[in-house]
Amino acid sequence: MINLVYKKPPLHKSNHLFLCDISSSCEWATTWFFAIMHGCYESFDKLTIYDFDHRLVNVTDILDMEFKNSFQIN
């Protein structure tokens, strides 16, 4: 009477895009921004990170390096 269907739910992977302000007005939070972006890089598989001050710079590949502390990230 009941037809059970066993299958895995579809995977919906999102493409995340992050834009980080590193201008002089946000200098006090730049290390914190980079630490968060590094954590996101480690957590998400489809991710692009851009930093901007006076132009946009793609820093996704830079975050692939190993960092020992937040000062190295900055």
Image: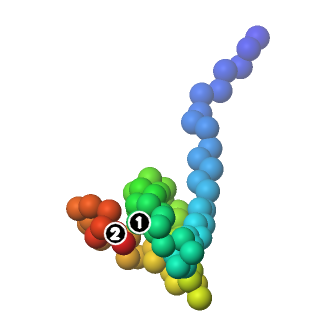
Q: Residue furthest left?
A: 68
Instruction: For mark 2, give the secondary structure.
Output: helix
Which residue shows up at 62% across the image and 50% down it?
Answer: 12
Q: Position of residue 50 (x, y in %)?
A: 54, 76
Residue 31 is tagged as 1
Q: Which residue is mark 2?
A: 73
Q: Name which residue lies at 54% across and 79% down.
A: 23
What's the residue at 23%, 62% (across, down)? 68
Which image quadrant is residue 52 in?
bottom right
Q: Position of residue 39 (x, y in %)?
A: 42, 56
Identify which amino acid the numbered label 2 is placed on.
Ile
Identity of the residue furthest to the right in this view: 1
Outermost residue, bottom direction?
A: 54
Residue at the spot 67% in from the left edge and 21% down from the top edge:
4
The first of marks 1 and 2 along the sequence is 1
Question: Element at badge 1?
Answer: helix
Distance of mark 1 from mark 2, alpha carbons?
Answer: 7 Å
Residue 51 vs residue 23, the one in the foreground: 23
Amino acid on which the number 1 mark rests in the picture? Thr
